[in-house]
Amino acid sequence: MRVVETHTSPGNILGVDDDGVARLVLDQYLSRSGFRPELATSVMHAQQIIEMRPPGYFDCVITDYQMPEKSGLDLLIWLRSKDPCLASIVIAGAGEKDLVAAALRNGANNYLDKPYRREDLEQAVNKAVETTRHRRELARNEADAAAVGHLQRHLLGGRNLAIPGKVHFSHHPKRTAGGDFLNVHPCPDGALLVLAADVSGHDLKAAFVSAYFQGIVRGMLEKSTPIDEVLSFFNHCLWSDWGDRSAVTLEMPTSLSLCAAVLPPGRGQATLFSAGFPDAQVVLPSGEIRPCGVGGGHPMGWFAEALPERKTVDVPESGWLVLWTDGLEDHARQLAVSPWGLAYTLLRRDESTARRASIGDAIDDILVVAVALGSASFDEGFPILADQYAGDRWREIDAIQNEWRNTLTLAIPALSEERLCEILICLREGMLNALKHGCKGRPECTASLRFQYQSKARNLRAWIDDPGPGHGFDWASHAYVAQRDLLPSHRGLSMMHHFASRIENHRHGASLTLDFHLPEPP
Amino acid sequence: MNHTIDDQVLAIGIPTDLLSTTVESLRAEILPLFDDTALKYSQVGKVHLNLCAVNMIDSAGVNFLVGIIRACQTRKLGITVTVKSRFVHRTLLFLRIDRHVELVVAS
């Protein structure tokens, strides 16, 4: 337990000067102003005194600049590593402006010209003491937040590592600790419960509510309480215990968005509970992505009787169930990448992931969870992009292509620029055809594009689909004539067939599957 | 787009990728350069197309390039195309454009 400090004393001050008269003046001035001074005759002497005292004993150091052997600047440099919160004041003679500037660059908070008046000294020392105490309070708060964040990471890691290969997750609080959390609970009947949640806010209050809820969930589940009762109880807690219902206030109450998935043994179906959380998605073995249809709604804690939406969905024998908080979508938008590409990058968690994904710039906590169904593994394939484009967006193809580029370079950093260009041009040709011809440029028609990266085979698979009838164009015959006679048209399909490792088309080309083999990086 | 005429060579520099979204404005800029009267007046005998700033080229970009090559052929002008990007170079080779122009790879 930490005792909250109230500073009644004006402060312990260390004065350093090689001149005896100057020390005497400093001692008298500080004492008369109510401070508790100690005096050192040199830098080394000051260092000895500081080392002998408990950490954080002094509230301010006042040092002369020019001294034999070591200068006041040497002391400031030493103090910066020894006690970075401790504020200091440098006393300099007239004509020592350059020295003062150097001292200020090295951490001094203020300076006094010799000779100085007692009032000026008192004012400067009061300010320095306040600065030191404020810095120490901030440092303590940061240390406390770091401890909460450490515990949070420990709780997440420790609970989930119990199911290796099944539950993959990535958690990045915006600050040291945050409100997103994950709970994975193997039920006595063999079912697996995966609960992802996002407490409103991303501060210590959110981290506290998050920890409180995790404790409740864990305790109640271990007593075999059905998940709907757990959620109902917690909604009651948020509503009645923490919401101030007596006052009319426009403040947002503490709330919690969540999605819980109960996956029974043998699978086949999963039961989902969702409240104000982005929709859960199922990735089928074919690479197709199926939204579960439980997204949206309002979070828990807003209304007394509000319960999460419940839905039973079919899940494949092999594939993925993927959940993420809205922080992931926000950050993907910020980076102009697909949320799937960002999710894949974070879930793979190599050393440079956080740097590549610029996690430090995220505006919210990020949690992404992928539950492997059956034998699914990242090596066999995971989506890195899935999007739909209205037919009239062919005019925006450069911006769309830029998002593909960003996503591919984020998710597959070893991809060479040359291969990337080949892939992008094929997708551009395919998508322009889908939007202009398949959708006839109409905004109510949409074409879709999905990428899946199969890391084991080093293959990028893309699917382009449009609702049109396809075409009967004989690209192979045309390619020959176009080369021979320099025809200025219809080279898109030739380029796609040349650069893709394999193309499969269905519905006369309205549905394309393209494989791009990615060579080993040199 | 920039161009110069020096020693009977019309040098054209393309400053951007050759894509469906850029070729229309480039075509509008380049078309007047192939005006027969202007070419005859300046005694142009060869065209040098500099694609060193082009990193991506799509089918519309290739078709634009083919249009320039055909304009040169019609006017019996020699044409040299300089590229820098490996992707652009590979695309032009695969489409056999090198059979119709002198294709130079800039280092």
Image: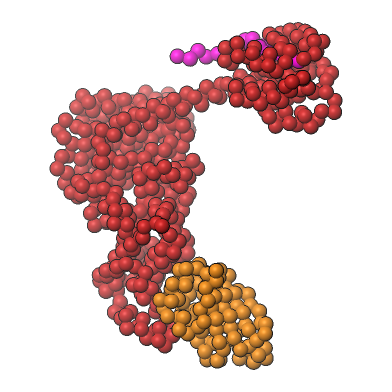
Q: Is residue A86 above or below residue B1?
A: above
Q: Is residue A234 above or below residue A1?
A: below
Chain coloured orange in the rendered structure: B
The residue nearer to you, when weighing A450 against B101, is: B101
The structure residue drawn at horizontal position 31% and vertical position 53%, both measured from the top left corner, is: A455
Q: Is residue A439 above or below residue B81?
A: above
The structure residue drawn at horizontal position 61% and vertical position 19%, both measured from the top left corner, is: A133
Q: Is residue A500 above or below residue A373?
A: below
Q: Quadrant of the C terminus of chain A?
A: bottom left
**Magenta stretch contains residue A212:** no
Residue A104 sits in which quadrant? Answer: top right
Q: Main secondary structure of the magenta part?
A: loop
Residue A208 sits in which quadrant? Answer: top left
The residue nearer to you, when weighing A287 against A395, is: A287
Which tint was used for chain A?
red
Residue A419 in the image: state x and y as whole percent: 41, 63
Relative to A12, is A218 on the left or the right? left
Tally the numbered discs: 0
Q: Would you say residue A408 is visible in this rendering? A: no
Which residue is most to the front? Answer: A69
Residue A113 in the image: state x and y as whole percent: 81, 22
Residue A39 in the image: state x and y as whole percent: 71, 10
The structure residue drawn at horizontal position 36% and vertical position 81%, both measured from the top left corner, is: A479
**Magenta stretch contains residue A14:** yes
Q: Would you say residue A398 is visible in this rendering? A: yes
The residue nearer to you, when weighing A35 against B99, is: B99
Residue A74 in the image: state x and y as whole percent: 69, 24
Relative to A288, is B45 on the left or the right? right
The structure residue drawn at horizontal position 39% and vertical position 26%, both measured from the top left corner, is: A151
Q: Which residues are magenta?
A: A1-17
Relative to B49, is A415 on the left or the right? left
